[in-house]
Image (tube, rainbow, N blue to C red):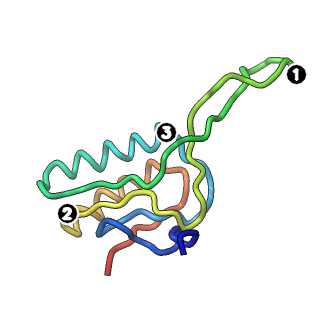
Amino acid sequence: METCLRSLGLQYGSFGLKTLESGHISARQIEACRRIIIRVLRRFPDSQLWIMIFPFVSVTKKPKEVRMGKGKGAHFEWVSAVKKGKMLFEISGVSEKAAFTVLNHVLTKLPLKTVIVKDD
């Protein structure tokens, strides 16, 4: 059953952000989303945030106008490979209105299509 955790929905929080497509999310994008969420969660004393992804894949890139060959390019950024249906962020301890507002703002910072999930 451990292999199917990706499709089970929320595990810790009351509200979450779930991807609808596969792709990569960079460490900078994750940090931008975290800052937006934390800014709102400070208003609620018992609120919590869970970040369900970690950028452990290194992406390399060669400079522009460099000839072919001469080995692999230098490290460019860290990314997290995300599959369809993966929960990205979960929050709890906030009102429904505040949760939907902040998660809608977070949607604009991500390169993938996502949907807000509410615990029943």
Residue sitting at 62 percent across and 53 percent down?
Answer: 23
Inspect the image, locate mark 3, and give the three-letter code of the amino acid beneath it: Ala
> Which picture quadrant has residue 31?
top left
**Which one is in front, 36 or 3?**
3
> Which picture quadrant has residue 11?
bottom left
Instruction: Give the class, few, some or many, for how many residues have Cα within 10 Å of label 3's Cα (few <14, many ≥20).
Output: some
Quadrant of the snapshot with the N terminus: bottom right
Residue 97 location, x and y as percent? 22, 67
Q: Which mark is residue 69?
A: 1
Quadrant of the snapshot with the C terminus: bottom left
Q: Which mark is residue 5?
A: none
Q: CA distance from mark 2 to mark 1?
A: 53 Å
Residue 53 position (above or below residue 73): below
Residue 75 location, x and y as percent? 64, 26
Say which label, 3 or 2, has the lower sequence index.
Answer: 3
**Which one is in front, 24 or 52?**
52
Say which label, 3 or 1, has the lower sequence index.
Answer: 3
Instruction: Give the class, few, some or many, for how many residues have Cα within 10 Å of label 1's Cα (few <14, many ≥20).
Output: few
Residue sitting at 88 percent across and 22 percent down?
Answer: 68
Q: Label 2: state its secondary structure.
A: loop
Instruction: Identify residue for label 3.
Output: 27
Which residue is most to the front? 1
Inspect the image, locate mark 2, and give the three-letter code of the amino acid beneath it: Val
Residue 74 position (above or below residue 14): above
